[in-house]
Image: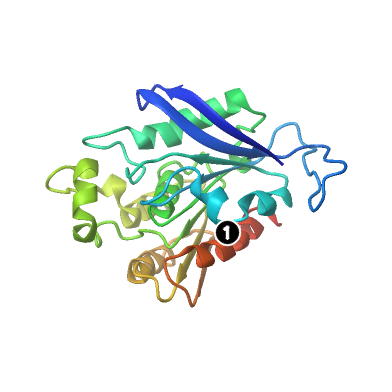
Amino acid sequence: MAFFESHFFSEALGVQTTVYVILPQKSTKGQIGLSGNGEKNEYKCLYLLHGLSDDHSIWLRRTSIERYATEYGICVVMPYGGRSFYTDMQYGGKYYTYIAEELPRLMQEFFHISDKRENSFIAGLSMGGYGALKMALKNPERYAAAAGLSSAADIRGVAMDFKDTLIPVFGEDINIPDSEDLLCLAEKANASPVKPRIYMGVGTEDFLYEGNQKLRAKVETLDFDYTYRESPGVHGWAFWDEYIQYVLEWMFGA
């Protein structure tokens, strides 16, 4: 695998921003411990989103995502999303527009990444799990599959717990519209002729567990190709390092 740190200007955000990208390398003769798996001309791509307290570097620093991705010969794009909940903020950047629209176009421009729906995937943890599921449910024609780990699945239910963070996102009244609520988005996306496969994973001791059960109950009443997995675990990296491996197998193993 090759690792790129890319700095570029985002028109959506109006500033320079950074993204980490790992790409398959066709030949790695002499490398110890890994082998190349990059025979394709256009790579399947996983957009991998970070949580509230972190940045674009965190998946590489806290997990072995590069090693895991090597097995499947995929590209992984890890953008910076601030504390935006991947939303076009009331007082801040247009992070939804950036991630959903501008970033894929730029990544296809810079790298050999496929623009086909069947090769486009998105996942994340916590705030990033919310963001990944939201992106896919709002744009079912763009993503083949989406995964949320320990997601902020019931954004309205936790709004007061994250009041100071959500005021810049949704305004002083924290008025969260249906277009930003995963339960409403799942209902709306259910009518789409094409729908992304959905994966949810959460630890049974996670403080966001109840919200995940609420979204799970909703999705299970709808017509999605849906996978849910839970096990003992808290809101932490030991759980996410384990579960990102399940996600990759679920997305790319078949």
The residue located at (72%, 48%) in the rendering is 70
Residue 224 pos. (x, y %): 49, 58
> Tag 1's secondary structure?
helix
Relative side of 204 to 40, left or right: left
Residue 169 image point, x, y percent: 24, 42
Quarter containing the C terminus? bottom right
Q: Residue 131, image x and y in percent?
A: 40, 48
Q: Name the foreground residue: 227 vs 73.
A: 73
Residue 29, by quadrant, is top right
Residue denoted by label 1: 244
Q: Residue at x 19, y 54 (%)?
A: 163
Query: Is residue 64 in view from this perspective?
Result: yes
For the N terminus, the image quarter is top right
What is the quadrant of residue 152 in the picture?
bottom left
Q: Position of residue 56 (x, y in %)?
A: 48, 42
* Vertical placement of residue 209 versus 100, above or below: below
Closest to the observer: 71 or 228?
71
Residue at 54 percent across and 59 percent down: it is: 225
Other-residue count near label 1 (Cα within 10 Å), few / some / many at <14 / 14–19 / ≥20: many
